[in-house]
Image (tube, rainbow, N blue to C red):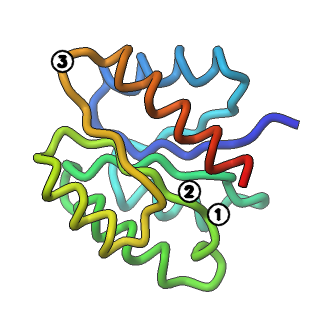
Amino acid sequence: MPKTLVVVEDSQFARAILSKELKKHGFNIVFAEDAESGHIQILQMETKPDLIILDLNLPALEGEDLGIMLSGMDETESIPIVIFSAKPEEEIKRAAELSGARDYVRKDQDMKSCIAQLVKKIKVILEE
């Protein structure tokens, strides 16, 4: 059965590339454009996602805050989070620690390479 990933990402460009690449690897994808709608979608899902991919630079509520909320709730604390952000690496590491994220990938100009790295990390986490 395919694994379901929730991707909280405000960039339409990043969502399009993530959709294409993640679907190639057999994942079901649910997208949210901001932290608030991502939070609502995750809580309303009948079957919780297998993993959450979380951007940090989001409008209104930051991705880090969403990660902290999700890791602190009984119904979502066991869902692994992977941060996928263009912020400086030190900020991403700090956000990962605060939110309980399992791993992170820093976005850069070579999105295909970043997404390949992201897919590898997702597969490792889902096999644990």
Percent x, y for residue 29? 61, 34
Q: Is residue 110 left or right of residue 119?
A: left
**Quarter occupied by residue 123:** top right
Seen from the viewer's position, the closer of residues 89 and 43 is 89
At mark 1, the secondary structure is helix
Work out whether 57 lies above or below 36.
above
**Residue occupied by mark 1:** 44
Residue 120 location, quadrant: top right
| Crowd class of label 1 (few under 14; some 14 to 19; many from 20; radius 10 Å) | few
Label of residue 93 in the image: none
Residue 66 vertical position relative to residue 16 in the rendered view, above or below: below
Q: Residue at x 19, y 59 (%)?
A: 60
Measure how far apart labels 3 and 2 are at the Cα level: 29 Å
**Looking at the picture, how far across and down is residue 2, in whole percent?**
80, 34
Residue position for label 3 = 109
Please name the residue shown 52% across and 40% down the image. Answer: 121
Circle 3: residue type: Gln
Which three-letter amino acid code belongs to the residue tagged 2?
Answer: Gln
Q: Residue at x 24, y 60 (%)?
A: 93
Q: CA distance from mark 2 to mark 1?
A: 5 Å
Residue 117 lies, in percent from the top left, at 44, 29
User: Where does the image place residue 112, in percent across and percent down from the top left?
Assistant: 37, 14
Residue beneath label 2, please?
A: 41
Q: Tag 2's secondary structure?
A: helix
The kind of residue on which mark 1 rests is Gln
Query: On the picture, is 13 further left or further right than 49?
Result: left
Disc 3 crowd rating (10 Å Cα; few below 14, some 14-19, many 20+) is few
How many C-alpha atoms fall within 10 Å of the one at disc 2: few (<14), some, or many (≥20)? some
Q: Which quadrant holds the N terminus?
A: top right
Q: Do callouts 2 and 1 mark residues in contact (Cβ within 8 Å)?
A: yes
